[in-house]
Amino acid sequence: MTRDMTARMLRLLSLLQTRREWSGADLAERLSVTVRTVRRDIDRLRELGYPVDSARGHAGGYRLAPGADLPPLLLDDDEAVAIAVALRTAAGGPTGIEEAALRALAKLEQVLPRRLRGRITALQSAASGIIWETRGPRVDPALLSTLAIACRDHEILTFDYASRHGTTGRRRAEPCHLVDSGGLWYLLAHDTDRDDWRLFRLDRVSDALPTGRRVPSRPVPGGDPAAFVAARLSAAPTRYRAVATVRAPADRVRALVPGLGTRLKPIDDSTCCLDASDDHLPRITRTLAGLDADYTLDAGPDVLDDLRRAAHRILRATG
């Protein structure tokens, strides 16, 4: 195609996406071409995979129809900003579609004009919403996007990371996958300084910077990133120990603690073992309070004290 024809085709596609139906004469007027040229351009769009329906006669016209696959869409500035903000919100919040939103966001931000990025950031920072259920620390959507692009492009990143003990250090790693586990996002990456696989909680990551160095894709041990992360999380040390033997089937308990699936082991058909150990006492208390079956508990004194305080508060409120 010549440059003029390509520009005209893109303009035609944009017009078709803005209105349900166009007459050939209206399109020809908008494009400053003949109706015959419009027909040829419509045929070219069909060859490219765009499902354009047409009807003959006085009331006939052209419209984009649903197709078997989603074709590329043309967005104006306002539409691009609205979609990017919505995707950032979905990627960083408890919506249930975080991973799909993250993939879409990475694709969109790759091609966003620089002039729109400031508008998106300003709108995102100024807008707030009410969240009735908190699944975990909220993650900066811009950070999610940066890490997703680095995973896709196999680009080494440097970033600050705060350990579970509160110390912060600069890390250098090859990002491979982002994994959501019970409301907490983790970056699965190969640490170049330690020459080993590491998990990084995204709420502890800051100042992530691409280095511009790309490396070949590195296969995850076992081939399943989610399974690898689950195994690492189940074996990770925790500050507070809390292991409950629950008198209920494992499948029933698993539905109550979706984020602790790897720490749940069936004992028999009617009993299971739940390791609710954690670094955060209130989270242990919420997990145990959410069980709808009797259980015996093997826990440290800090956990037992927090459970007693919670029980006393409930008794005072109901007494």
Image (tube, helix red, strand yellow):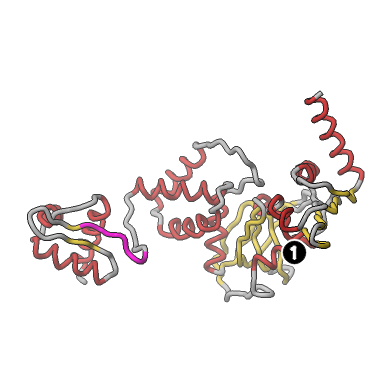
Mark 1, other Cα within 10 Å: few <14 / some 14–19 / many ≥20: some
Query: For the point 23% across and 55% down, which residue is it?
Result: 16
Quadrant containing the C terminus is top right
Q: In which quarter of the image is residue 237?
A: bottom right
Location of residue 63 in the rendering, given as x and y in whole percent from the top left corner: 22, 57
Location of residue 66 in the rendering, given as x and y in whole percent from the top left corner: 31, 60
Could you say which is closer to the camera, residue 228 or residue 151? Answer: 228
Could you say which is closer to the camera, residue 59 or residue 170? Answer: 59
Quadrant containing the N terminus is bottom left
Is residue 290 positioned above or below 199 on the image? above
Is residue 109 positioned above or below 118 on the image? below
- Majority secondary structure in the magenta region: loop
Query: For the point 58% across and 74% down, which residue is it?
Result: 217
Q: Mark 1 points at which residue?
A: 232
**The furthest residue to the top:** 319
**The furthest residue to the right:** 301
Question: In this rendering, would 304 be left or right of 269?
Answer: right
Location of residue 174 in the rendering, given as x and y in whole percent from the top left corner: 63, 67
Location of residue 205 in the rendering, given as x and y in whole percent from the top left corner: 66, 53
Query: For the point 86% across and 44% down, which residue is it?
Result: 303
**Residues in magenta?**
63-69
> Which amino acid is tagged 1?
Arg
Could you say which is closer to the camera, residue 183 or residue 2? Answer: 183
Q: Is residue 67 magenta?
A: yes
